[in-house]
Image (cartoon, rainbow, N blue to C red):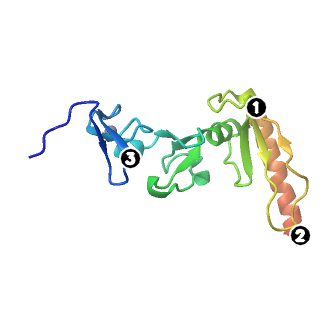
């Protein structure tokens, strides 16, 4: 039988990555941890869990019953239901899911500053197609009532365009 390693013991995995024998901060299970993680895989994949990608951006795992689950994407072996925390905070602020062509920037470039005045919602130009009016327009964060009004106006515009056969 293999002996249990001591905490802090180091080994290499099959891909020669350094791992440390440690305790999962969430469930307390002992496991070989890659230094960039701080919890075991099963805890990392539970709803509400967050992880930081190689660019320092934080992502959050949403439950299927989350009102903003529709904008979540799949992250390979990490499974479905992930969105960046900045998108999630902005969606909660606006009270709607962000569209795929919308993105959020941190004004002060601090990826951990999720204060609403520091977040700006922008629209991305589509790579293909010519149905684009306006370019990279900055949508300033608005309050929920204004966001609802804006969403209704957009829906009305869409209905009008559809009735004219424009879309
Ligand atoms: Zn765990």
Q: In screen coordinates, is 159 left or right of 102?
A: right
Residue 17: mark: 3
Q: In screen coordinates, is 1 left or right of 101?
A: left
C-alpha gap between disc 2 and disc 3: 55 Å
Spot occupied by residue 164 in the image (x, y as percentages of width and height): 91, 70
Spot occupied by residue 130 in the image (x, y as percentages of width and height): 87, 67
Residue 163 found in image quarter? bottom right
| Element type at mark 2 | loop
Q: Earlier in the sequence, mark 2 or mark 3?
A: 3
* x 71%, y 32%: residue: 109
- The label nearer to you, 1 versus 2, is 1
| Element type at mark 1 | loop
Spot occupied by residue 104 in the image (x, y as percentages of width and height): 72, 41
Q: Earlier in the sequence, mark 3 or mark 1?
A: 3
Spot occupied by residue 126 in the image (x, y as percentages of width and height): 80, 60
* x 38%, y 46%: residue: 17
C-alpha gap between disc 3 and disc 1: 35 Å
- The label nearer to you, 2 versus 3, is 3
* x 58%, y 47%: residue: 83
Q: In screen coordinates, is 125 left or right of 64?
A: right
Q: Residues within 10 Å of mark 2 (few under 14, many from 20)?
A: few
Q: How many marks?
A: 3
- Up-down relation of residue 79 to residue 58 (above or below): below
Look at mark 1 in the image and give the residue it sits on.
107
Q: Nearer the viewer, residue 54 or 152?
A: 54
Ligand 1 falls in quadrant: top left
Look at mark 2 in the image and give the residue it sits on.
166
Whether residues under marks 2 and 3 lie with C-beta atoms below 8 angstroms apart, the answer is: no
């Amino acid at each position: 039988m293999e002996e249990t390693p001591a905490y802090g013991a180091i080994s290499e995995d099959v891909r020669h990555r350094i791992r440390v024998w440690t305790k999962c901060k969430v469930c307390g299970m002992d496991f070989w941890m890659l230094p960039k993680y701080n919890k075991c895989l099963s805890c990392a994949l539970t709803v509400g869990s967050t992880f930081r990608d190689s660019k320092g951006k934080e992502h959050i795992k949403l439950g299927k019953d989350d009102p903003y689950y529709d904008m979540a994407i799949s992250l390979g072996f990490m499974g479905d239901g992930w969105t960046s925390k900045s998108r999630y905070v902005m969606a909660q602020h606006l009270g709607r899911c962000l569209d795929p062509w919308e993105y959020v920037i941190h004004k002060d470039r601090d990826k951990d500053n999720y204060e609403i005045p520091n977040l700006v919602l922008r629209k991305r130009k589509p790579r293909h197609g010519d149905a684009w009016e306006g370019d990279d327009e900055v949508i300033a964060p608005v309050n929920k009532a204004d966001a609802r009004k804006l969403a209704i106006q957009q829906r009305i515009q869409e209905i009008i365009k559809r009735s004219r056969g424009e879309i």
